[in-house]
Amino acid sequence: MSITVLHAPESKIFSNKVAKHLTRQTQYDGLFLPFPRESAEFIFRLCEGLPANLVVPDLKKALEPILSPIEDPWEKSVEPLLKALSQIKKGNPKMQPYCYRDSFFAHFETGNSGELAVLVLKTMMSGKIDAKEWKAVIKKDRKYRFDSLEAEIDFIAHHAENHEKSSCISSTGNYFASRLQEEGFETNLISFGHYSLTPIEQLISKVFQESIPDEEIKKLVLLHIKYIKKYLYRSTNIEEANYRWQIRKDPLKRLLFEIKKLRQKN
């Protein structure tokens, strides 16, 4: 039994790349999607060919208690994949889709994001950064995050035993590939390009992985606030802000993006 882990950050660009890849592949009969398990009914409908514009609104409504509040960026980041599911199923008639995301952590993560937002507002208003407070809020979800990842690995391993070849989409591809290999699966990792972590993602990663000096925390918090002002405030949503961040060091891509935005306004 083998599993191909498709490492793709949660953004529309990478979702589009993954969708195209899966549409071209016809050698897997299990597909593990990074959606809450409560999404399964709606994913089945999309696989069977129901139009996304009829299914997605019901999907968002069903997930409100878990991912509340669900905003357009979530929908936009997975839109290419949702729309491609019927084509993917058509090319793989025996393909069985699974939604593996642990709902408990998804709900907890929403609350923790709220605490981080409060800290950002507090910092912007006072001009002061309490490094210990930032570290405490970020560390609070460490245990929940890893427990959730283990629950997801268990879910995938249990169901993947029923399939000769499976594909699994994950934003933590290296970890998933390593753990699934430990579970006895032959694994293959495919990455869909470079992704530059936003300041808050860098901060969370460093707090999780190592002992980070208070000065480094303060530096990344200031950079996060700069990101909010320069990218988030000037964008229509988080998805666009993240894209602006990704292309910030590429003058040609920045120019093409701004031209596209001007054309859309006109």
Image (cartoon, helix red, strand yellow):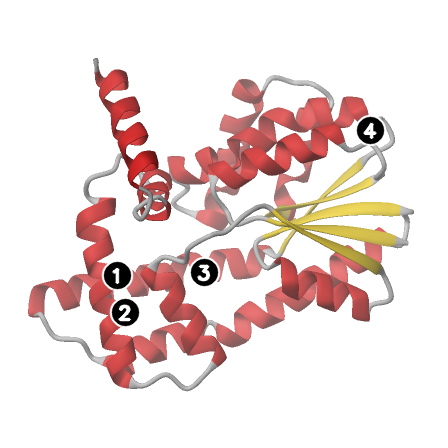
Nearer to us: label 4 or label 2: 2
The answer to whether marks 2 and 1 mark residues whose Cβ atoms lie closer than 8 Å is: yes
Per the rendering, the mark at residue 69 is: none
Q: How far apart in space, not on screen, are marks 1 and 3 (Cα)?
A: 19 Å
- Residue wearing tag 2: 220
| Residue 42 in view, yes or no | no
Picture residue at 66% right of the left edge, 25% below the top: 46
Task: Specify few, some or many for label 4: CA neighbours under 10 Å numbering under 14, 14-19, or 20 or more.
Answer: some
Please tell me which residue lies in front, 192 or 73.
192
Q: Is residue 1 above or below residue 17?
A: below
Total labels: the figure holds 4
- Residue wearing tag 4: 92
Q: Is residue 4 above or below residue 214?
A: above
- Answer left or right for 67 relative to 260: right
- Residue wearing tag 1: 224
Q: Earlier in the sequence, mark 1 or mark 3?
A: 3
Can you give x and y, in whole percent of width and height, for residue 228 in the image?
22, 52
Residue type at mark 1 is His
| Residue 141 in view, yes or no | yes
- Answer left or right for 253 relative to 13: left
Q: How far apart in space, not on screen, are marks 4 and 2 (Cα)?
A: 45 Å
